[in-house]
Amino acid sequence: MSKKAEKATELFLQGYNCSQAVFAAFSEDLGMDFETAVKFLAPFGGGMGGMREVCGAVSGMFAVAGMKYGYTDFKDPQAKAKHYKMVQKLADEFKAKNNSIICRELLGLENGVAESASGSKDRELLCTEFVKCAAEIIEKLIDESEVKDMKLVIPVENKALDVPVCPSFGRAPFFVIYNTENGEHKFIDNSASASQGGAGIKAAQMLADSGADFLITYRCGENAANVLNAADIKIYKAEDGSVAENIEKCKGGKLSFLAEIHPGFHNHGGANK
């Protein structure tokens, strides 16, 4: 059993509903605190509020996919189609293993809600298997989507990989651009570091022009984040340790997305001063 499946199963057996169990097992990786995670997924247990419709474990799996890979630009039909295709793939894989994604069908309930309160031991055992299955499927998808053949960019104070990530984004003296496919990397000067204002925005535009795919940083201003998002550059939160260690964590899918985007310092929007 995978670690996430084991965690999801543990949460379910503690009493969290099927949807909460699956989603909360991934909450830390998604940059969401546990309490928010279980509140967010509370309505989906028992096939949507006990109505025995779409399996709550499946809904939890979909929610993880949304938080991890969901689109934000409603004007981008390709992103929407791509995400829906991912959801359909997840559903198909669950169906292939369990013959359905509908709660009442999975549990053999003829009357749906009317039987939802019976709470038989056999039903609990079945639901435990569905929770484990959903967690394993979405974890497998995440593992297969590890950073490959991508350009990682990290702010640094010195031209080396064994140094800590620079605590500033816009004011970092250098950036390292790292190719995850072959390990090749180069250091570039941050021309925005000496700017009197808007350093974060200028640095973000420079990275967008470089063709970067991912940024690893401790913090980022909202205006800079808007530039990065427009360029489809995903922003991950740096962790304590060296640049090299952060690269390996990112490649292994162990870094969380940067959840807190600050409004900027000294009222300069995205500028990091």
Image: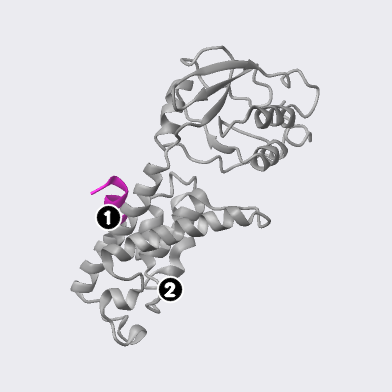
| Residue 242 in sight from this viewpoint | no
Q: Where is mark 1, residue-wise?
A: 10
Identify the image quadrant of residue 208. top right
Q: Position of residue 262 (x, y in %)?
A: 66, 39
Judge whether 43 appears above or below 69 on screen. below
Q: Residue at x 23, y 68 (%)?
A: 126
The location of residue 263, given as percent across then percent down, is 71, 40
Residue that lies at the very extreme toward the left in this rendered image: 122
Q: Nearer the viewer, residue 70 or 263?
A: 70
Residue 213 found in image quarter = top right
Give the x, y percent position of residue 36: 49, 55
Q: Residue at the spot x=70%, y=38% of the render?
A: 227
Magenta-span inclusion, residue 30: no
Q: Main secondary structure of the magenta part?
A: helix
Number of the label disc, if any, that sits on residue 237: none
Q: Nearer the viewer, residue 227 or 125?
A: 227
Q: Nearer the viewer, residue 238 or 189?
A: 189
For disc 2, the marked residue is 48
Amino acid on which the number 1 mark rests in the picture: Glu
Tell me the mark number nearer the camera, choosing from 1 and 2: 2
Task: Indicate yes or no whether the magenta region holds residue 3.
Answer: yes
In the displayed structure, 48 sits above or below 74; it is below
Where are the magenta residues, as a range? Answer: 1-8
Residue in the foreground of this view, choosing between 226 and 121: 226
C-alpha span from label 1 to label 2: 21 Å
In this picture the colour scheme is one colour
> Badge 2: how crowded within 10 Å, few (<14), some, or many (20+)?
some
**Image-quadrant location for residue 211:** top right
Nearer the N terminus, badge 1 or badge 2? 1
Q: In which quadrant is the C terminus drawn?
A: top right
Tell me the residue at 69%/40% (across/down): 222
Question: In the structure shown, which secondary structural element does the residue marked by tag 1 occupy?
Answer: helix
